[in-house]
Amino acid sequence: MRFINIIIFKRFIFQALLISIITVMLSQPMLVSAADIDSGYSCQTAKVPGATVSTCQPDPVGSVFGQIQPPSAITALGNGSTGISKFLNNLIILIYMIAAVVFIFMMVWGALQWLISGGDKEAVAGARNRIIHAIIGIMLFAAAFALIQILGTFTGFKFF
């Protein structure tokens, strides 16, 4: 039993010594090259009479978590509000293109329905309603366009 206690005590002393050595090493300023400054070190320079002294220590956040690089498709859009603005701009342009295609399709469909109605009052009324609804829909998109421009002015996002 005494032998086991000695082994446990030696292991405890070894671990405590190892932890204290690592703590002292990490707390001491290190000399690093300029290439190391960009790779996980935070450096500070101080002007001393007759010299400039730079001290660098490992960056605790960078050494634990590393650098996160966004995918290339996202970096092509841009970072921060620029990326969000470009994404929303592309999305709104896509929605307006789809709305324009649907508007043209509804107008042509209503016109053809009117032409082939053969004088039937219900068919003419249905065709007229289809054309009127298409015009109302495109007017709503025009109002939404104006609202987006106003919101873009207030938020700083550039649309269109």
Image (cartoon, rainbow, N blue to C red):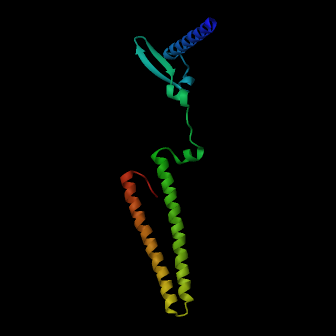
Q: Nearer the viewer, residue 2 or 10?
A: 2
Classify residue 6 by image quadrant. Answer: top right
**Image point (40%, 55%), residue name:** 152
**Image point (47%, 17%), residue name:** 54
Horizontal side, residue 146 vs residue 115: left or right = left
The residue lying furthest to the bottom in this view is 119
Q: Is residue 30 visible?
A: no
Q: How many marks?
A: 0
| Above or below, 142 relative to 41 | below
**Image point (54%, 12%), residue name:** 16
| Above or below, 105 relative to 154 | below
Residue 51: where, in percent of width, then height?
A: 44, 12
Quarter of the picture holding the N terminus? top right
Residue 116: where, in percent of width, then height?
A: 57, 89
Residue 60: where, in percent of width, then height?
A: 50, 25
| Above or below, 9 relative to 68 | above
Q: Nearer the viewer, residue 54 or 42?
A: 42
Q: Is residue 65 visible?
A: yes
Residue 85: where, in percent of width, then height?
A: 47, 51
| Above or below, 30 relative to 6 | below
**Image point (45%, 56%), residue name:** 159
